[in-house]
Image: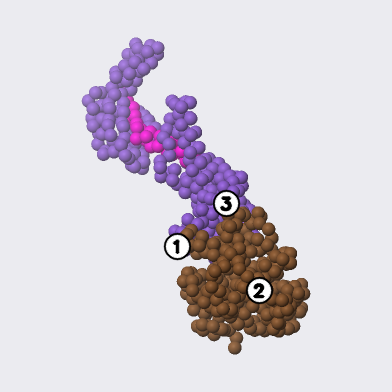
Amino acid sequence: MSFLQALLYFFREALVNLLRSWKVGLLAVLTITVSLLVGGAFLLMSRNLAASVGQWQKEMRVVIYLRPDTGADELRRLAAEAGRPAWVAAVEPVTAEAARDRFTEIFPTLSDLVEGWEDEPLPASLEIRLGDFEPATLETWLAGWRRRPEVSMVDDDREWLRQVATAVAVVRGVGLALGAGLLAAAIFTIMSVIRLTAYLHHEEISIMRLVGATEFYIRGPFYAEGLLQGLLGGGLASAGLYGAYQLLHARSPGSLFTTVLAGTFLSWREIAFLILLGGGAGLLGAVASLRRESL
Amino acid sequence: MIQFFHVSKLYPGGQAALADVTFDIPRGQFVFLTGASGAGKTTLLRMIFREEVPSDGQIVVNGRNVSSIPQSKIPYLRRTIGVVFQDFRLIPRKTVFENVTYLPRILGFDLKNQKRLAYQALRRVGLAHRANAFPPELSGGEQQRVAIARALINEPEILIADEPTGNLDPDLSREILRLFLEVNLRGTTVLLATHDRDMIQRVGRRVLTLDHGRLAADQMLEGTDPPDLTETREDEGEPRPEAGSQAARDEDPEREPWREPEAAEPLAGRGDGAGEDAPP
Protein backbone atom coordinates (compact mmCIF):
# COMPACT_ATOMS: atom_id res chain seq x y z
CA MET A 1 0.00 0.00 0.00
CA SER A 2 1.47 3.34 -1.03
CA PHE A 3 1.67 6.20 1.43
CA LEU A 4 -1.11 8.03 -0.40
CA GLN A 5 -3.33 4.97 -0.34
CA ALA A 6 -2.58 4.61 3.36
CA LEU A 7 -3.57 8.23 4.00
CA LEU A 8 -6.78 7.75 2.08
CA TYR A 9 -7.51 4.64 4.09
CA PHE A 10 -6.78 6.46 7.37
CA PHE A 11 -9.03 9.40 6.57
CA ARG A 12 -11.82 7.20 5.25
CA GLU A 13 -11.74 5.13 8.43
CA ALA A 14 -11.53 8.28 10.57
CA LEU A 15 -14.52 9.83 8.79
CA VAL A 16 -16.58 6.70 9.21
CA ASN A 17 -15.64 6.61 12.87
CA LEU A 18 -16.46 10.29 13.36
CA LEU A 19 -19.85 9.81 11.75
CA ARG A 20 -20.59 6.65 13.68
CA SER A 21 -19.68 8.09 17.08
CA TRP A 22 -20.44 11.73 16.31
CA LYS A 23 -21.57 12.68 19.82
CA VAL A 24 -18.19 11.99 21.40
CA GLY A 25 -16.40 13.49 18.41
CA LEU A 26 -18.55 16.61 18.61
CA LEU A 27 -17.41 17.20 22.18
CA ALA A 28 -13.79 17.26 21.07
CA VAL A 29 -14.55 19.45 18.07
CA LEU A 30 -16.52 21.96 20.17
CA THR A 31 -13.82 22.14 22.82
CA ILE A 32 -11.21 22.99 20.28
CA THR A 33 -13.64 25.39 18.56
CA VAL A 34 -14.19 27.34 21.78
CA SER A 35 -10.48 27.53 22.55
CA LEU A 36 -9.60 28.70 19.06
CA LEU A 37 -12.55 31.08 19.00
CA VAL A 38 -11.27 32.78 22.14
CA GLY A 39 -7.68 32.75 20.91
CA GLY A 40 -8.81 33.99 17.50
CA ALA A 41 -10.86 36.81 19.02
CA PHE A 42 -7.84 38.03 20.94
CA LEU A 43 -5.71 37.68 17.83
CA LEU A 44 -8.24 39.77 15.91
CA MET A 45 -8.35 42.44 18.60
CA SER A 46 -4.62 42.63 19.10
CA ARG A 47 -3.86 42.78 15.36
CA ASN A 48 -6.43 45.58 14.89
CA LEU A 49 -5.23 47.45 17.93
CA ALA A 50 -1.65 47.07 16.75
CA ALA A 51 -2.66 48.33 13.31
CA SER A 52 -4.38 51.32 14.92
CA VAL A 53 -1.31 52.06 17.01
CA GLY A 54 0.81 51.81 13.88
CA GLN A 55 -1.48 54.25 12.11
CA TRP A 56 -1.45 56.61 15.07
CA GLN A 57 2.31 56.42 15.16
CA LYS A 58 2.40 57.40 11.53
CA GLU A 59 0.12 60.32 12.30
CA MET A 60 2.00 61.27 15.46
CA ARG A 61 2.58 65.01 15.83
CA VAL A 62 5.09 66.95 17.79
CA VAL A 63 4.16 70.51 18.72
CA ILE A 64 6.97 72.88 19.76
CA TYR A 65 5.50 75.89 21.55
CA LEU A 66 7.69 78.95 21.30
CA ARG A 67 8.07 81.93 23.58
CA PRO A 68 5.41 84.67 23.15
CA ASP A 69 7.93 87.15 21.76
CA THR A 70 8.95 84.94 18.83
CA GLY A 71 8.74 86.94 15.67
CA ALA A 72 7.72 85.78 12.18
CA ASP A 73 11.30 85.64 10.86
CA GLU A 74 12.45 83.58 13.79
CA LEU A 75 9.46 81.30 13.39
CA ARG A 76 10.38 80.69 9.75
CA ARG A 77 14.02 80.06 10.70
CA LEU A 78 13.07 77.59 13.41
CA ALA A 79 10.60 75.87 11.04
CA ALA A 80 13.35 75.43 8.46
CA GLU A 81 15.65 74.03 11.14
CA ALA A 82 12.98 71.65 12.41
CA GLY A 83 12.38 70.34 8.92
CA ARG A 84 15.97 69.25 8.36
CA PRO A 85 15.91 65.63 9.63
CA ALA A 86 14.89 63.18 6.93
CA TRP A 87 12.27 61.55 9.16
CA VAL A 88 10.36 64.84 9.59
CA ALA A 89 7.52 64.63 7.08
CA ALA A 90 6.27 68.22 7.35
CA VAL A 91 6.60 71.32 9.52
CA GLU A 92 3.81 73.85 9.78
CA PRO A 93 4.73 77.13 11.47
CA VAL A 94 1.74 78.52 13.35
CA THR A 95 1.96 82.18 14.31
CA ALA A 96 0.37 83.48 17.52
CA GLU A 97 -2.35 85.19 15.44
CA ALA A 98 -3.09 82.00 13.53
CA ALA A 99 -3.29 80.07 16.80
CA ARG A 100 -5.80 82.60 18.15
CA ASP A 101 -7.90 82.45 14.98
CA ARG A 102 -7.89 78.66 15.06
CA PHE A 103 -9.01 78.67 18.70
CA THR A 104 -11.85 81.05 17.91
CA GLU A 105 -12.88 78.94 14.99
CA ILE A 106 -12.82 75.68 16.91
CA PHE A 107 -14.36 77.04 20.12
CA PRO A 108 -16.56 80.01 19.06
CA THR A 109 -18.33 80.16 22.43
CA LEU A 110 -15.00 80.58 24.20
CA SER A 111 -13.70 83.26 21.87
CA ASP A 112 -14.00 85.86 24.65
CA LEU A 113 -11.13 84.18 26.39
CA VAL A 114 -8.67 85.14 23.71
CA GLU A 115 -10.10 88.52 22.71
CA GLY A 116 -9.03 91.90 24.13
CA TRP A 117 -5.51 90.95 25.28
CA GLU A 118 -2.71 93.44 24.84
CA ASP A 119 -0.31 90.68 23.78
CA GLU A 120 -1.22 87.55 21.90
CA PRO A 121 -2.57 85.04 24.48
CA LEU A 122 -1.49 81.93 22.60
CA PRO A 123 2.09 81.19 21.67
CA ALA A 124 3.42 80.63 18.19
CA SER A 125 4.29 77.02 17.50
CA LEU A 126 5.79 74.50 15.11
CA GLU A 127 3.49 71.61 14.26
CA ILE A 128 5.64 68.74 13.08
CA ARG A 129 4.43 65.54 11.38
CA LEU A 130 6.85 62.65 11.60
CA GLY A 131 7.74 59.99 9.07
CA ASP A 132 9.56 56.75 9.94
CA PHE A 133 11.69 57.59 12.91
CA GLU A 134 13.88 55.79 15.41
CA PRO A 135 12.44 56.38 18.88
CA ALA A 136 15.90 57.04 20.38
CA THR A 137 16.78 59.59 17.68
CA LEU A 138 13.49 61.39 18.20
CA GLU A 139 14.03 61.41 21.94
CA THR A 140 17.47 63.06 21.56
CA TRP A 141 16.12 65.51 19.02
CA LEU A 142 13.20 66.56 21.23
CA ALA A 143 15.51 66.92 24.25
CA GLY A 144 17.64 69.33 22.17
CA TRP A 145 14.58 71.44 21.38
CA ARG A 146 13.48 71.50 25.03
CA ARG A 147 16.80 73.02 26.04
CA ARG A 148 16.62 75.89 23.59
CA PRO A 149 15.75 79.38 24.95
CA GLU A 150 13.20 80.02 22.13
CA VAL A 151 11.12 77.06 23.23
CA SER A 152 8.63 77.18 26.07
CA MET A 153 7.23 73.63 25.78
CA VAL A 154 7.44 70.51 23.63
CA ASP A 155 4.36 68.32 23.37
CA ASP A 156 4.21 64.94 21.67
CA ASP A 157 1.87 61.86 21.55
CA ARG A 158 4.50 59.34 22.46
CA GLU A 159 3.48 58.78 26.05
CA TRP A 160 -0.08 58.14 25.06
CA LEU A 161 1.01 55.85 22.25
CA ARG A 162 3.27 54.04 24.66
CA GLN A 163 0.30 53.36 26.90
CA VAL A 164 -1.75 52.12 23.96
CA ALA A 165 1.13 49.89 22.88
CA THR A 166 1.27 48.49 26.41
CA ALA A 167 -2.46 47.83 26.20
CA VAL A 168 -1.89 45.97 22.90
CA ALA A 169 0.81 43.85 24.54
CA VAL A 170 -1.52 43.09 27.45
CA VAL A 171 -4.35 42.12 25.11
CA ARG A 172 -1.95 39.95 23.13
CA GLY A 173 -0.52 38.34 26.27
CA VAL A 174 -3.91 37.68 27.82
CA GLY A 175 -5.14 36.25 24.51
CA LEU A 176 -2.08 34.09 24.19
CA ALA A 177 -2.35 32.80 27.76
CA LEU A 178 -6.09 32.24 27.54
CA GLY A 179 -5.81 30.65 24.09
CA ALA A 180 -2.95 28.40 25.20
CA GLY A 181 -4.84 27.34 28.31
CA LEU A 182 -7.96 26.57 26.37
CA LEU A 183 -5.94 24.81 23.67
CA ALA A 184 -4.33 22.64 26.34
CA ALA A 185 -7.81 21.81 27.59
CA ALA A 186 -8.84 20.99 24.03
CA ILE A 187 -5.82 18.72 23.56
CA PHE A 188 -6.70 16.98 26.80
CA THR A 189 -10.29 16.52 25.62
CA ILE A 190 -9.14 15.12 22.30
CA MET A 191 -6.77 12.80 24.14
CA SER A 192 -9.68 11.53 26.23
CA VAL A 193 -11.93 11.16 23.21
CA ILE A 194 -9.31 9.28 21.18
CA ARG A 195 -8.43 7.11 24.16
CA LEU A 196 -12.10 6.37 24.67
CA THR A 197 -12.47 5.55 20.98
CA ALA A 198 -9.43 3.29 21.12
CA TYR A 199 -10.86 1.61 24.21
CA LEU A 200 -14.20 1.11 22.48
CA HIS A 201 -12.35 -0.43 19.54
CA HIS A 202 -9.97 -2.45 21.70
CA GLU A 203 -11.34 -5.74 20.44
CA GLU A 204 -11.19 -4.52 16.88
CA ILE A 205 -7.58 -3.42 17.33
CA SER A 206 -6.61 -6.82 18.68
CA ILE A 207 -8.25 -8.42 15.63
CA MET A 208 -6.33 -6.07 13.35
CA ARG A 209 -3.11 -7.12 15.02
CA LEU A 210 -4.12 -10.73 14.69
CA VAL A 211 -4.55 -10.58 10.93
CA GLY A 212 -1.21 -8.83 10.47
CA ALA A 213 -1.86 -5.11 10.54
CA THR A 214 1.19 -3.05 11.42
CA GLU A 215 1.07 -0.43 14.19
CA PHE A 216 1.14 2.22 11.46
CA TYR A 217 -2.16 0.97 10.05
CA ILE A 218 -3.72 0.46 13.45
CA ARG A 219 -2.85 3.91 14.75
CA GLY A 220 -3.19 5.82 11.49
CA PRO A 221 -6.99 6.14 11.55
CA PHE A 222 -6.88 7.42 15.13
CA TYR A 223 -4.27 10.03 14.24
CA ALA A 224 -6.38 11.04 11.25
CA GLU A 225 -9.41 11.29 13.52
CA GLY A 226 -7.62 13.65 15.91
CA LEU A 227 -6.34 15.70 13.00
CA LEU A 228 -9.82 15.93 11.47
CA GLN A 229 -11.38 16.93 14.79
CA GLY A 230 -8.77 19.65 15.20
CA LEU A 231 -9.12 20.94 11.64
CA LEU A 232 -12.90 20.92 11.98
CA GLY A 233 -12.62 22.82 15.26
CA GLY A 234 -10.26 25.35 13.67
CA GLY A 235 -12.60 25.77 10.70
CA LEU A 236 -15.64 26.23 12.92
CA ALA A 237 -13.75 28.72 15.10
CA SER A 238 -12.74 30.76 12.04
CA ALA A 239 -16.29 30.67 10.70
CA GLY A 240 -17.69 31.63 14.09
CA LEU A 241 -15.23 34.47 14.41
CA TYR A 242 -16.13 35.76 10.95
CA GLY A 243 -19.84 35.55 11.81
CA ALA A 244 -19.28 37.53 15.00
CA TYR A 245 -17.19 40.06 13.08
CA GLN A 246 -19.92 40.58 10.48
CA LEU A 247 -22.59 40.82 13.16
CA LEU A 248 -20.58 43.45 15.02
CA HIS A 249 -20.16 45.54 11.89
CA ALA A 250 -23.84 45.20 11.05
CA ARG A 251 -25.04 46.12 14.56
CA SER A 252 -22.66 48.95 15.45
CA PRO A 253 -20.67 49.94 12.40
CA GLY A 254 -19.10 53.14 13.71
CA SER A 255 -18.42 52.28 17.33
CA LEU A 256 -14.98 52.63 18.83
CA PHE A 257 -14.86 48.89 19.52
CA THR A 258 -15.70 48.05 15.92
CA THR A 259 -13.26 50.45 14.35
CA VAL A 260 -10.34 50.08 16.73
CA LEU A 261 -10.57 46.45 17.84
CA ALA A 262 -12.29 44.81 14.90
CA GLY A 263 -11.61 47.10 11.98
CA THR A 264 -10.42 44.40 9.60
CA PHE A 265 -10.82 40.63 9.74
CA LEU A 266 -7.97 38.16 9.98
CA SER A 267 -5.87 37.59 6.88
CA TRP A 268 -6.06 34.28 5.00
CA ARG A 269 -2.71 33.38 6.47
CA GLU A 270 -3.99 33.94 10.01
CA ILE A 271 -7.14 31.95 9.29
CA ALA A 272 -4.99 29.12 7.92
CA PHE A 273 -2.84 29.37 11.04
CA LEU A 274 -5.91 29.02 13.28
CA ILE A 275 -7.15 25.98 11.36
CA LEU A 276 -3.72 24.35 11.27
CA LEU A 277 -3.28 25.09 14.97
CA GLY A 278 -6.51 23.19 15.55
CA GLY A 279 -5.29 20.33 13.37
CA GLY A 280 -1.96 20.27 15.16
CA ALA A 281 -3.66 20.22 18.55
CA GLY A 282 -5.90 17.37 17.41
CA LEU A 283 -2.98 15.36 16.09
CA LEU A 284 -0.98 16.02 19.23
CA GLY A 285 -3.90 14.84 21.35
CA ALA A 286 -4.22 11.67 19.29
CA VAL A 287 -0.51 10.88 19.39
CA ALA A 288 -0.32 11.54 23.12
CA SER A 289 -3.32 9.35 23.83
CA LEU A 290 -2.09 6.38 21.81
CA ARG A 291 1.10 5.57 23.56
CA ARG A 292 2.03 1.91 23.43
CA GLU A 293 0.35 0.98 26.69
CA SER A 294 -2.96 2.57 25.75
CA LEU A 295 -3.64 0.32 22.79
CA MET B 1 6.61 -26.02 9.06
CA ILE B 2 5.96 -25.61 12.78
CA GLN B 3 8.73 -26.70 15.09
CA PHE B 4 8.81 -26.46 18.87
CA PHE B 5 12.13 -27.09 20.59
CA HIS B 6 11.89 -27.62 24.36
CA VAL B 7 9.41 -24.80 24.71
CA SER B 8 8.29 -23.77 28.17
CA LYS B 9 6.06 -20.97 29.31
CA LEU B 10 5.90 -19.73 32.85
CA TYR B 11 3.31 -17.18 33.79
CA PRO B 12 4.00 -14.61 36.49
CA GLY B 13 3.77 -16.35 39.80
CA GLY B 14 5.62 -19.38 38.51
CA GLN B 15 2.63 -21.22 37.06
CA ALA B 16 3.77 -23.35 34.11
CA ALA B 17 1.48 -23.24 31.08
CA LEU B 18 3.86 -25.30 28.95
CA ALA B 19 6.80 -27.42 30.00
CA ASP B 20 9.51 -28.69 27.66
CA VAL B 21 7.28 -29.18 24.62
CA THR B 22 8.99 -30.46 21.48
CA PHE B 23 7.32 -31.44 18.20
CA ASP B 24 7.57 -30.92 14.46
CA ILE B 25 4.62 -30.46 12.12
CA PRO B 26 5.59 -30.85 8.46
CA ARG B 27 4.07 -28.77 5.69
CA GLY B 28 0.56 -29.80 4.65
CA GLN B 29 -0.23 -31.90 7.72
CA PHE B 30 -3.54 -31.80 9.59
CA VAL B 31 -2.95 -31.99 13.34
CA PHE B 32 -5.35 -32.04 16.26
CA LEU B 33 -4.14 -30.48 19.49
CA THR B 34 -6.07 -31.80 22.41
CA GLY B 35 -6.07 -31.88 26.15
CA ALA B 36 -8.23 -30.87 29.08
CA SER B 37 -9.08 -27.26 29.74
CA GLY B 38 -5.98 -25.51 31.09
CA ALA B 39 -3.64 -28.06 29.52
CA GLY B 40 -1.89 -25.29 27.56
CA LYS B 41 -3.53 -25.63 24.11
CA THR B 42 -4.34 -21.94 23.70
CA THR B 43 -0.94 -20.84 25.00
CA LEU B 44 0.76 -23.13 22.51
CA LEU B 45 -1.32 -21.78 19.61
CA ARG B 46 -0.76 -18.17 20.65
CA MET B 47 2.98 -18.77 20.63
CA ILE B 48 2.89 -19.77 16.97
CA PHE B 49 1.66 -16.34 15.89
CA ARG B 50 3.70 -14.60 18.59
CA GLU B 51 0.84 -13.52 20.77
CA GLU B 52 2.80 -15.17 23.55
CA VAL B 53 6.55 -15.43 23.98
CA PRO B 54 8.10 -18.62 25.38
CA SER B 55 9.98 -18.39 28.65
CA ASP B 56 12.39 -20.97 27.32
CA GLY B 57 13.03 -22.89 24.11
CA GLN B 58 12.69 -21.99 20.45
CA ILE B 59 9.78 -21.93 18.02
CA VAL B 60 10.35 -21.99 14.29
CA VAL B 61 7.43 -21.28 11.98
CA ASN B 62 7.98 -21.58 8.26
CA GLY B 63 11.70 -21.05 8.71
CA ARG B 64 11.39 -18.07 11.04
CA ASN B 65 12.50 -18.20 14.60
CA VAL B 66 9.37 -16.77 16.18
CA SER B 67 10.97 -16.53 19.60
CA SER B 68 13.43 -13.91 18.46
CA ILE B 69 11.51 -12.18 15.67
CA PRO B 70 11.57 -8.38 16.10
CA GLN B 71 8.34 -6.66 17.10
CA SER B 72 8.15 -4.85 13.77
CA LYS B 73 8.22 -8.14 11.83
CA ILE B 74 5.39 -9.80 13.73
CA PRO B 75 2.65 -8.48 11.39
CA TYR B 76 4.42 -10.07 8.43
CA LEU B 77 4.58 -13.40 10.26
CA ARG B 78 0.87 -13.18 11.05
CA ARG B 79 0.00 -12.55 7.43
CA THR B 80 1.20 -16.06 6.65
CA ILE B 81 -0.92 -17.61 9.39
CA GLY B 82 -4.69 -17.79 9.43
CA VAL B 83 -6.21 -17.86 12.90
CA VAL B 84 -9.72 -18.91 13.86
CA PHE B 85 -11.06 -18.58 17.38
CA GLN B 86 -13.90 -20.15 19.27
CA ASP B 87 -15.54 -16.74 19.72
CA PHE B 88 -15.08 -15.82 16.03
CA ARG B 89 -13.56 -12.40 16.79
CA LEU B 90 -15.29 -10.55 13.99
CA ILE B 91 -15.67 -6.77 13.97
CA PRO B 92 -19.39 -6.27 14.56
CA ARG B 93 -19.62 -2.81 13.00
CA LYS B 94 -18.10 -3.96 9.73
CA THR B 95 -19.82 -6.04 7.09
CA VAL B 96 -18.81 -9.58 6.28
CA PHE B 97 -17.02 -8.24 3.20
CA GLU B 98 -15.13 -5.64 5.27
CA ASN B 99 -14.21 -8.22 7.90
CA VAL B 100 -12.93 -10.68 5.35
CA THR B 101 -11.01 -8.14 3.28
CA TYR B 102 -9.32 -6.27 6.12
CA LEU B 103 -5.86 -7.56 5.23
CA PRO B 104 -6.14 -7.04 1.44
CA ARG B 105 -7.45 -3.55 2.18
CA ILE B 106 -4.50 -2.49 4.32
CA LEU B 107 -2.19 -4.05 1.76
CA GLY B 108 -3.56 -1.66 -0.83
CA PHE B 109 -5.55 -4.05 -3.01
CA ASP B 110 -8.04 -2.17 -5.12
CA LEU B 111 -11.73 -2.77 -4.58
CA LYS B 112 -12.02 -5.05 -7.59
CA ASN B 113 -9.34 -7.39 -6.27
CA GLN B 114 -10.73 -7.19 -2.75
CA LYS B 115 -14.09 -8.29 -4.10
CA ARG B 116 -12.51 -11.10 -6.10
CA LEU B 117 -10.61 -12.39 -3.08
CA ALA B 118 -13.60 -11.99 -0.78
CA TYR B 119 -15.84 -13.82 -3.20
CA GLN B 120 -13.38 -16.69 -3.49
CA ALA B 121 -12.93 -16.97 0.27
CA LEU B 122 -16.63 -16.64 1.06
CA ARG B 123 -17.59 -19.09 -1.65
CA ARG B 124 -15.28 -21.64 -0.09
CA VAL B 125 -17.19 -21.37 3.15
CA GLY B 126 -20.57 -21.16 1.41
CA LEU B 127 -21.32 -17.56 2.40
CA ALA B 128 -20.77 -15.58 -0.80
CA HIS B 129 -24.39 -14.40 -0.60
CA ARG B 130 -23.93 -12.84 2.86
CA ALA B 131 -21.11 -10.45 1.98
CA ASN B 132 -23.12 -7.36 2.89
CA ALA B 133 -24.48 -8.66 6.18
CA PHE B 134 -23.12 -7.59 9.55
CA PRO B 135 -21.82 -10.30 11.90
CA PRO B 136 -24.63 -9.87 14.46
CA GLU B 137 -27.09 -10.72 11.69
CA LEU B 138 -25.47 -14.12 11.20
CA SER B 139 -25.86 -17.39 13.07
CA GLY B 140 -22.96 -18.75 15.13
CA GLY B 141 -22.04 -21.22 12.40
CA GLU B 142 -22.11 -18.50 9.76
CA GLN B 143 -19.96 -16.22 11.88
CA GLN B 144 -17.44 -18.99 12.33
CA ARG B 145 -17.39 -19.56 8.59
CA VAL B 146 -16.79 -15.84 8.04
CA ALA B 147 -13.88 -16.06 10.49
CA ILE B 148 -12.54 -18.99 8.49
CA ALA B 149 -12.96 -17.03 5.24
CA ARG B 150 -11.01 -14.15 6.79
CA ALA B 151 -8.30 -16.57 7.83
CA LEU B 152 -8.17 -18.08 4.36
CA ILE B 153 -8.30 -14.95 2.23
CA ASN B 154 -4.54 -14.75 1.89
CA GLU B 155 -4.18 -18.49 1.30
CA PRO B 156 -2.12 -18.86 4.47
CA GLU B 157 0.50 -21.52 4.74
CA ILE B 158 -0.70 -22.33 8.23
CA LEU B 159 -4.22 -22.32 9.62
CA ILE B 160 -4.61 -22.34 13.38
CA ALA B 161 -7.95 -22.87 15.03
CA ASP B 162 -8.61 -22.67 18.74
CA GLU B 163 -11.73 -24.63 19.65
CA PRO B 164 -13.48 -23.49 16.45
CA THR B 165 -16.48 -25.70 17.10
CA GLY B 166 -16.72 -25.07 20.81
CA ASN B 167 -19.77 -22.82 20.48
CA LEU B 168 -21.50 -24.76 17.74
CA ASP B 169 -24.02 -27.60 17.65
CA PRO B 170 -22.86 -31.04 16.39
CA ASP B 171 -24.13 -30.54 12.83
CA LEU B 172 -22.42 -27.16 12.47
CA SER B 173 -19.30 -28.56 14.09
CA ARG B 174 -19.13 -31.27 11.45
CA GLU B 175 -19.60 -28.67 8.72
CA ILE B 176 -16.81 -26.48 10.09
CA LEU B 177 -14.51 -29.44 10.53
CA ARG B 178 -15.14 -30.43 6.96
CA LEU B 179 -14.08 -26.93 5.90
CA PHE B 180 -10.78 -27.30 7.72
CA LEU B 181 -10.17 -30.65 6.09
CA GLU B 182 -10.87 -29.11 2.68
CA VAL B 183 -8.45 -26.29 3.41
CA ASN B 184 -5.87 -28.90 4.36
CA LEU B 185 -6.53 -30.71 1.07
CA ARG B 186 -5.42 -27.53 -0.70
CA GLY B 187 -2.04 -27.76 0.98
CA THR B 188 -2.47 -25.61 4.07
CA THR B 189 -1.00 -26.91 7.29
CA VAL B 190 -3.81 -27.04 9.84
CA LEU B 191 -3.44 -27.13 13.60
CA LEU B 192 -6.79 -27.44 15.31
CA ALA B 193 -7.15 -27.32 19.07
CA THR B 194 -10.15 -29.14 20.52
CA HIS B 195 -11.10 -31.11 23.58
CA ASP B 196 -13.73 -33.02 21.60
CA ARG B 197 -12.25 -36.53 21.69
CA ASP B 198 -15.19 -37.97 19.74
CA MET B 199 -14.49 -35.67 16.82
CA ILE B 200 -10.83 -36.67 16.84
CA GLN B 201 -11.66 -40.37 16.95
CA ARG B 202 -14.10 -39.98 14.10
CA VAL B 203 -11.79 -37.97 11.84
CA GLY B 204 -8.43 -39.48 12.70
CA ARG B 205 -5.15 -37.73 11.69
CA ARG B 206 -2.19 -36.80 13.88
CA VAL B 207 -3.04 -35.89 17.47
CA LEU B 208 -0.88 -33.98 19.94
CA THR B 209 -2.12 -34.35 23.49
CA LEU B 210 -1.19 -31.88 26.18
CA ASP B 211 -1.47 -32.64 29.85
CA HIS B 212 -0.67 -29.95 32.40
CA GLY B 213 1.54 -28.19 29.88
CA ARG B 214 3.48 -31.29 28.87
CA LEU B 215 3.22 -33.10 25.57
CA ALA B 216 1.75 -36.34 26.84
CA ALA B 217 1.23 -38.04 23.47
CA ASP B 218 1.96 -37.61 19.79
CA GLN B 219 0.09 -40.24 17.80
CA MET B 220 -1.48 -40.96 14.40
CA LEU B 221 -5.09 -42.11 14.55
CA GLU B 222 -7.15 -43.86 11.94
CA GLY B 223 -10.54 -42.18 11.75
CA THR B 224 -13.61 -44.25 12.49
CA ASP B 225 -15.96 -42.09 10.41
CA PRO B 226 -14.05 -39.47 8.39
CA PRO B 227 -16.18 -36.91 6.54
CA ASP B 228 -16.76 -37.41 2.85
CA LEU B 229 -14.88 -34.58 1.19
CA THR B 230 -16.12 -35.49 -2.25
CA GLU B 231 -19.54 -33.96 -1.54
CA THR B 232 -20.26 -30.87 -3.60
CA ARG B 233 -20.25 -27.34 -2.20
CA GLU B 234 -20.59 -23.87 -3.70
CA ASP B 235 -17.17 -24.24 -5.26
CA GLU B 236 -18.25 -27.40 -7.07
CA GLY B 237 -16.47 -27.91 -10.35
CA GLU B 238 -13.12 -26.53 -9.28
CA PRO B 239 -10.39 -29.15 -9.45
CA ARG B 240 -9.12 -30.01 -5.98
CA PRO B 241 -5.39 -30.30 -5.55
CA GLU B 242 -4.04 -33.37 -3.92
CA ALA B 243 -3.61 -33.40 -0.19
CA GLY B 244 -0.46 -31.63 0.90
CA SER B 245 0.02 -30.07 -2.51
CA GLN B 246 1.41 -26.60 -2.92
CA ALA B 247 -0.39 -26.22 -6.23
CA ALA B 248 -3.45 -24.42 -4.98
CA ARG B 249 -1.49 -21.80 -3.08
CA ASP B 250 1.28 -21.43 -5.59
CA GLU B 251 -0.99 -20.93 -8.56
CA ASP B 252 -2.12 -17.52 -7.34
CA PRO B 253 0.45 -14.91 -8.41
CA GLU B 254 -0.99 -12.37 -5.98
CA ARG B 255 0.08 -14.36 -2.98
CA GLU B 256 3.38 -12.54 -2.77
CA PRO B 257 1.95 -9.25 -1.44
CA TRP B 258 1.19 -11.01 1.85
CA ARG B 259 4.88 -11.55 2.33
CA GLU B 260 7.21 -9.19 4.06
CA PRO B 261 9.22 -7.76 1.14
CA GLU B 262 12.69 -8.08 2.56
CA ALA B 263 11.91 -11.39 4.23
CA ALA B 264 10.36 -13.20 1.29
CA GLU B 265 13.21 -15.62 1.77
CA PRO B 266 13.09 -17.43 5.08
CA LEU B 267 15.17 -15.73 7.75
CA ALA B 268 17.62 -18.58 7.74
CA GLY B 269 17.95 -18.70 3.99
CA ARG B 270 16.48 -22.17 3.77
CA GLY B 271 13.42 -22.76 1.68
CA ASP B 272 11.89 -25.27 4.00
CA GLY B 273 12.46 -26.09 7.59
CA ALA B 274 14.39 -24.42 10.33
CA GLY B 275 16.52 -21.33 9.88
CA GLU B 276 20.06 -20.68 10.88
CA ASP B 277 18.86 -18.94 14.00
CA ALA B 278 16.86 -22.00 14.89
CA PRO B 279 18.26 -24.45 17.37
CA PRO B 280 19.95 -27.46 15.87
Q: Chain of mark 1?
A: A
Is the residue under label 1 in contact with that under label 3 (CB below 8 Å)? no
Left or right side of A134 for B32? right
> Residue A111, located in which quarter of the rendered image?
top left
Question: Which amino acid does the dot numbered 1 rest on?
Answer: Ser
Chain A, chosen colour in render: purple
The relative height of residue B126 versus residue B36 in the rendered view (above or below) is above
Q: Position of residue A58 (x, y in %)?
A: 34, 35
Segment colored magenta: A40-68
- The alpha-carbon separation of the residues under discs 2 and 3 comes to 45 Å
Question: How packed is label 2: few (under 14 Cα within 10 Å), some, or many (20 or more)?
Answer: few
Q: Residue at x 47, y 74 (%)?
A: B262
Labels 3 and 1: the sequence-earlier one: 1
The relative height of residue A186 versus residue B88 in the rendered view (above or below) is above
Which residue is the site of mark 1? A2
Which residue is the site of mark 3? A17
Question: Which amino acid does the dot numbered 3 rest on?
Answer: Asn
Question: Which amino acid does the dot numbered 2 rest on?
Answer: Asp
Q: Chain of mark 3?
A: A
Left or right side of B196 for B161? left
Which residue is the site of mark 2? B228
Q: Position of residue A131 (x, y in %)?
A: 30, 37
Q: Chain of mark 2?
A: B
- The alpha-carbon separation of the residues under discs 3 and 1 comes to 22 Å
Please tell me the numbered disc located at residue B143. Answer: none
Q: Residue at x 34, y 11 (%)?
A: A116
Is the residue under label 1 in contact with that under label 2 (CB below 8 Å)? no
Supply the letter of whichever chain is brown.
Answer: B
